[in-house]
Image (cartoon, rainbow, N blue to C red):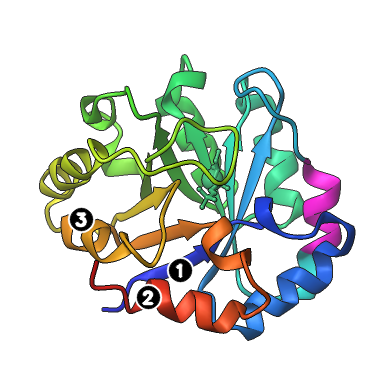
Amino acid sequence: MSVLIAPSILSADFAQLGAEVKAIDEAGCDWIHIDVMDGHFVPNLTFGPPVIKAIRPWTKKVFDVHLMIDPAQPYLEDYAKAGADIITVHAEADKHLHRSVQAIRALGKKAGVSLNPHTPESVIEYVIDTIDMVLVMSVNPGFGGQSFITSQLDKIARIKRMIGDRPIDIQVDGGVTADNAGKVVAAGATCLVAGSAVFKTKDYAGNIAAIRNSKG
Ligand code: DX5
Ligand code: ZN
């Protein structure tokens, strides 16, 4: 199966977010990756449920919401109601990861768990049967346009072995480009997030295709 491509709208033109979402939809993306930052868990601030709700009518594609917020649990319902299809929480931001994953599932949404670059994959061991996705951060979260941390390739391969034949996506986020995407997929990624590599020029279709077809 071909790798899923999820452009991060963190690199889009915020002044015309609806049109940008429509444009990446028409350019052939699979999911829309939405980076929510709180200025506390990460040193940057983006947007929350009202903005997600406002862009929801612009596409039917999956809204993949990456919550870089601490705490996340009190807000899960707000993100579900705003139009999220997948809600990912950070293991480092959650004292009760198992409870949050269950809460996301109880809202009828898919549940993801994200790991910062320093976080070992062992933290997912006891939630692995209740999650739909593991998000491997290949940069320290907070900003687009950073370089891929190559040590994460080994982590991706370890997570692939832990998952076995369970239907769980491995998403990789940060510094993914057409130059390294092939290696990331070879390690085990099933979904690639890309911000700057998609939005760097107006040829979104060409940029998405280059990542999808990367052999690097
Ligand atoms: C970083 C975000 C990423 C970011 C990726 O905190 O989670 O989704 O937008 O941007 P690039 O692809 O430019 O590294
Ligand atoms: Zn992200």
What residue would you read off at disc 2?
Answer: 212
Label 1 Cα crowd, 10 Å radius (few <14 / some 14-19 / many 20+): many
Earlier-in-chain disc, 1 versus 2: 1
Earlier-in-chain disc, 2 versus 3: 3
User: Is 23 situated above or below 112?
Assistant: below
User: Is 75 situated above or below 23?
Assistant: above
Label 2 Cα crowd, 10 Å radius (few <14 / some 14-19 / many 20+): many
Query: Distance of mark 1 from mark 2, alpha carbons?
Result: 7 Å
Closer to the camera in the image, 202 or 61: 202
Question: At x 75% / y 50%, what residue is drawn?
Answer: 81
What residue would you read off at disc 1?
Answer: 5
| Residue 60 visible in this rendered orientation of the protein | no
Label 3 Cα crowd, 10 Å radius (few <14 / some 14-19 / many 20+): few
Q: Position of residue 44 (x, y in %)?
A: 69, 28
| Residue 18 visible in this rendered orientation of the protein | yes
Query: Distance of mark 2 from mark 3, alpha carbons?
Result: 23 Å
Earlier-in-chain disc, 3 versus 1: 1
What residue would you read off at disc 3?
Answer: 166
Q: Which residues are magenta?
A: 47-55
Q: Secondary structure at mark 3?
A: loop
Mark closer to the observer (2, 3): 2
Q: Position of residue 167 (x, y in %)?
A: 26, 60
